[in-house]
Image (spheres, rainbow, N blue to C red):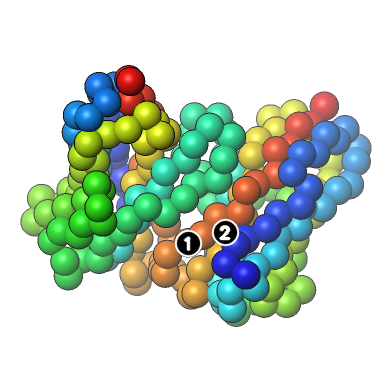
Amino acid sequence: GENVEQHPSTLSVQEGDSAVIKCTYSDSASNYFPWYKQELGKRPQLIIDIRSNVGEKKDQRIAVTLNKTAKHFSLHITETQPEDSAVYFCAAIIGNTGNQFYFGTGTSLTVIP
Amino acid sequence: DTEVTQTPKHLVMGMTNKKSLKCEQHMGHRAMYWYKQKAKKPPELMFVYSYEKLSINESVPSRFSPECPNSSLLNLHLHALQPEDSALYLCASSQRTGAPQYFGPGTRLLVL
């Protein structure tokens, strides 16, 4: 199966600074990479995703980049705000194995006001 | 309706009890999922239903029994659970397998 590694496990940034979370995957057949944000006591929410035929995608302060050759993808949050504080999970899907999600281990982001 | 709903929000049960968790979506999604999530860990996939048929069963103990009565509903029947089964149980749905998944709020289960 797929193995998704996520770093760092915890991240603290000052409000207004940028935050970057990185994930690597092992199976070159992975073709879809979503990112989820989970606030304390709440459900995981899809915040951005990217498919393997695209190198970068941006949505306001959030962007995701994908390097298929190196098998890694990253979440970039600019101008961080306290409400960005949450646990972020990356995931990878292998299209030809039942389309199962493989989640990373999560990054706990704290934005310090 | 653009949400996945789950009931109950909280559940406390003894090891000899039988209970059921319910999940509902009205987005026309044809894939539905059960996940188990422990504190500070990623969701762990338990079951996948695609077009109301069980397509993935991740070696889950038989004390967990899924059911998909129709394309909008997903149940998880619980029987003779162990304290280590205490966790947040999340339901999710997607248009099809491999498409973006949308999670319900979860049922927080405590087994005494």
Which chain is mark 1 on? B
Q: Quadrant of residue B17?
A: top right
Residue placed at 73% from the left, 77% from the top? B70
Q: Check disc 1: other Cα within 10 Å, few if <14, some if 14-19, many if 20+.
A: many
In this orientation, which residue lies closer to the viewer: B50 or A41? Answer: A41
Asked if the residues shown at circle 1 and circle 2 are in contact, with their CB atoms under 8 angstroms apart, the answer is yes
Q: Position of residue B14 (x, y in %)?
A: 88, 33
Reading the image, the residue beneath label 2 is B92
| Residue B33 visible within the image | no
- What's the residue type where badge 1 is placed? Gln
Mark 2 or mark 1, which is nearer the start of the sequence?
2
| Residue A79 visible within the image | yes
Reading the image, the residue beneath label 1 is B101
> Going by the image, does B2 lie left or right of B74?
left
Residue placed at 70% from the left, 38% from the top? B108
Residue placed at 32% from the left, 20% from the top? A112
> Going by the image, does B43 lie left or right of A61?
right
Which chain is mark 2 on? B
- What's the residue type where badge 2 is placed? Ala
The N terminus of chain B - image quarter: bottom right
Element on which disc 1 rests: loop
Q: CA distance from mark 1 to mark 2?
A: 6 Å
